[in-house]
Image (cartoon, grey):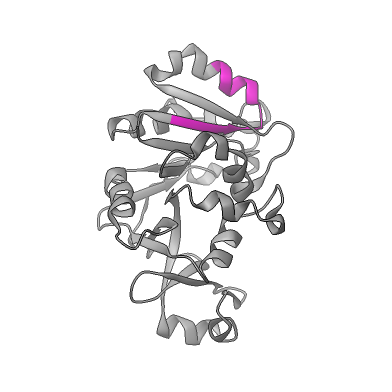
Amino acid sequence: MKSAFIFAAGLGTRLKPLTDRMPKALVPYGGTPLLEQTIENLKRQGFDRFVINIHHFAQMIRDFVAQHNSFDTKIEFSDESDLLRDTGGAIKHAAHLLSEGPFLIHNVDIISNLDLNALYNTHLEDRQRPLATLLVSSRETSRYFLFDGDNRLVGWINKSTGQVKSPFEEIAKQSVEQLTEQYRPLAFGGMHVISPEIFPLMAEPRWGEKFSVIDFYLWAAKEHLIRGYEAPAGTTLTDVGKLDQIGAIAPANT
């Protein structure tokens, strides 16, 4: 079975006032709720087992899935009603549902024409057995991951503030300008494939219950391979997490 973990627990504050009465996952885009579009797209590409994390209007999402007969597939919920755990904490909390093999993470507010099988298979077939493979692109933003010539994650920068994060001391002490000359700055695309070997690392006390997966990756990259997968030319990523993005399609390679 090919598993996907759909992030759907967020408060959707950027979509207010729509999310004052419904979860972000059920906000319609082109007349169809985001969650339905995400599940159907994943099904078309061969994914047949889904875990959905829920928090904001959690019961509405449960009811929606039940009304659609679980979209004729296997769907389980990782309930975060007690605490919204951020992206890293959400993955850790769902470990008991995702520990059987590699799984795809998909944000519910990203609509894309990406070949998800290519991303998934790239991770699966990598002989160096990366801990995670991250979808990235050269789109314009202020925050970027840094990758070396082998597409290995080595750090993170914020071009607007000059902030640098890296587990490698020789990288962490350099300026953004220096680093962009030595490494490839690529923007995260909200999708990644993860191996279950990640869970023992997340169980370390330093991480607790609530933490960002970005912070985790930047820590883990010192001793574990985290690979970048650059979106092919022609890939579109539509971020519908903000009201002003509802109708906009943003090319991944701009």
Task: Estimate the x, y position of residue 254 in percent, counting from the top left.
Answer: 34, 63
Rendered residue at 43%/22% (across/down): 74
Residue 59 within the segment the image draws in magenta: yes
Task: Estimate the x, y position of residue 32 in percent, counting from the top left.
Answer: 43, 26
Rendered residue at 58%/56% (across/down): 201
Q: Is residue 111 left or right of residue 58?
A: left
Task: Estimate the x, y position of residue 234 in percent, counting from the top left.
Answer: 25, 54
Q: Is residue 83 depicted above or below 89 in this figure?
A: above
> Which residue is at the far right?
82
Which quarter of the image is occupied by the N terminus? top left
Residue 93 within the segment the image draws in magenta: no
Between 147 and 17, the one nearer to me in the picture: 147
Rendered residue at 55%/49% (across/down): 199
Between 78 and 8, the one nearer to me in the picture: 78
Between 240 and 231, the one nearer to me in the picture: 231
**Residue 30 shows up from this direction:** no
Q: Is residue 108 depicted above or below 210 in this figure?
A: above
Rendered residue at 40%/36% (across/down): 3
Q: Is residue 239 depicted above or below 204 in this figure?
A: above
Q: Is residue 87 depicted above or below 21 in this figure?
A: below
Q: Is residue 243 left or right of residue 139?
A: right
The picture quadrant where one finds residue 189 is bottom left
**Residue 198 shows up from this direction:** yes
Task: Estimate the x, y position of residue 144 in percent, counting from the top left.
Answer: 49, 68
The picture quadrant where one finds residue 220 is bottom right
Region of the chain picked out in magenta, as a range:
50-63
